[in-house]
Amino acid sequence: MRKPAKHKMHLEALKETDPKLYALLIREKERQMNGLELIPSENLVSQAVLEALASVPTNKYSEGYAKKRYYGGNEIIDEIELLAIERLKKLFNAEHANVQPLSGSPANMAAFFALMEPNDKFMALRLDMGGHLTHGHAVNFSGKIFRPVHYLLDPETEMLDYDAIEKLAKREKPKVIVSGYTAYPREIDFKRFKEIADDVGAYSMADIAHIAGLCCAGVHENPVPYFDVVTTTTHKTLRGPRGAAIMCRQEFAERIDRAVFPFLQGGPHENVIAAKAVAFKEASTKAFKRYAKQVVKNARALADELEALGNRLVSGGTDNHLMLVDVTVKGLTGKQAEKALEKAHIYCNKNTIPFDKRSPFDPSGIRLGTPAVTTRGMKEGEMKELAYLINCVLENPHSDSVIKKVRSSVLELCREFVFYE
């Protein structure tokens, strides 16, 4: 995989008209380029995606769907949205796709309301095990409107126990079974989930927000062709703009579309949909497939080296783009580790680990991921260096001299892998 070409931000007009905001945007670009983004849900989009985001479809109101809009003047907007839909369907071998969801949470909400009635029961992985807020947490719509039944990870392996999930499904008889997670570092056996759902008469739903780029590139299993409904964000490993999409079998198409609009959303953001179309095209290339493979190679290299340096990784490693590090082994909390690494310009997020006894606001772990650093062109050698730098901070979180030295090494590495000029 060659180093990516450098990309430029075009902000000339903004510099003239709003120098204060211009300065803030430049500072944020410099923060990204002078630090290492290891938050698994973050990535760096291409210049083409940025240009589509800042394009004239942002001016257009287009409530409804192609050929059935509530406003006039949408002939070209229809072509843009249909192009995004066709590219997404081809990318994942989907029968139907909706590209209007604004984010992952409303995409999951639309899927839930398409498949269930209020107070219906569904199964999903609990938040502290690696699930998502929208998978049934009590403070979220999913836990307030529907009845979640949570399956857990095996306490010994910290991995999914499919036999236990099957037993729970047979006992609870849920309307929907959700697979796909936000902080689970292992491959998912989607075919087994489909078998379990079919066996108990449940709808099969996958939330592949984190691994969509791996699924479409053939690095991980793609559940879209045989699952009832699949939701995804379009950023993260898919490396597109911040947004979401829903794919489903044709028999659920009308229910999904009606749940997105008019039930949940009004006018779609067609400039974002244009940028999604760009990203879907990029994700169909051989270069993207190489990128997706390298994301996993980098994650495994980073995980292996961290473990070799005495860190404990949840489940003992990773199969995808992310890993969870139990920082209590180093005498730290997740919040302390996140703040110390941030001072060194290494960005991660505090995260619960399975069966965590600490609060989600200051949990026992941190979550690390390789999508963004891989986009910058880094490979296994850089991951080993990065593991060393992370470990230095975790072992010396209160040492200003150590953090200063690590920050200097991070800046040196960043200068070698510039993405935005």
Image (tube, rainbow, N blue to C red):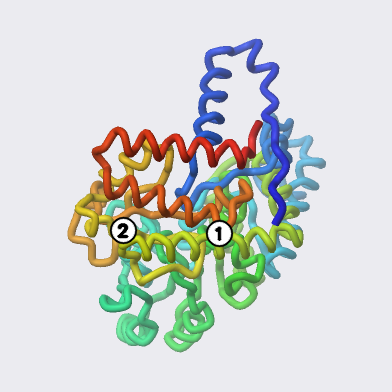
Amino acid tagged 1: Glu
Closer to us: mark 1 or mark 2?
1
| Residue 419 placement, left or right of 229 | right
User: Does residue 52 lie above or below 81 as drawn?
Assistant: above
* Disc on res. 124: none
- Residue of label 1: 380
| Residue 28 placement, left or right of 355 | right
Image coordinates for residue 143, horizontal then vertical, percent: 32, 59
- The residue carrying pointer 2 sits among few (fewer than 14), some (14 to 19) or many (20 or more) residues within 10 Å by Cα, namely many
Amino acid tagged 2: His
Kindly state the secondary structure of the residue where label 2 is placed: loop
Kindly state the secondary structure of the residue where label 1 is placed: helix
Residue at 26% of width from left, 52% of height from top? 360
Residue at 48% of width from left, 74% of height from top? 188
Sequence-wise, the earlier of marks 1 and 2 is: 2
User: How many numbered circles does the render carry?
Assistant: 2
| Residue 7 placement, left or right of 346 | right
Camera-nearest residue between 104 and 45? 45
Q: From where the camera sits, is residue 396 visible?
A: yes
Image coordinates for residue 54, horizontal then vertical, percent: 68, 32
Q: Mark 1 and mark 2: span between their CA atoms? A: 37 Å
- Residue of label 2: 137
Residue at 32% of width from left, 82% of height from top? 168
Camera-nearest residue between 273 and 305? 305
User: Does residue 399 lie above or below 315 as drawn?
Assistant: above
Residue at 42% of width from left, 42% of height from top? 346
Image coordinates for residue 311, horizontal then vertical, percent: 32, 61
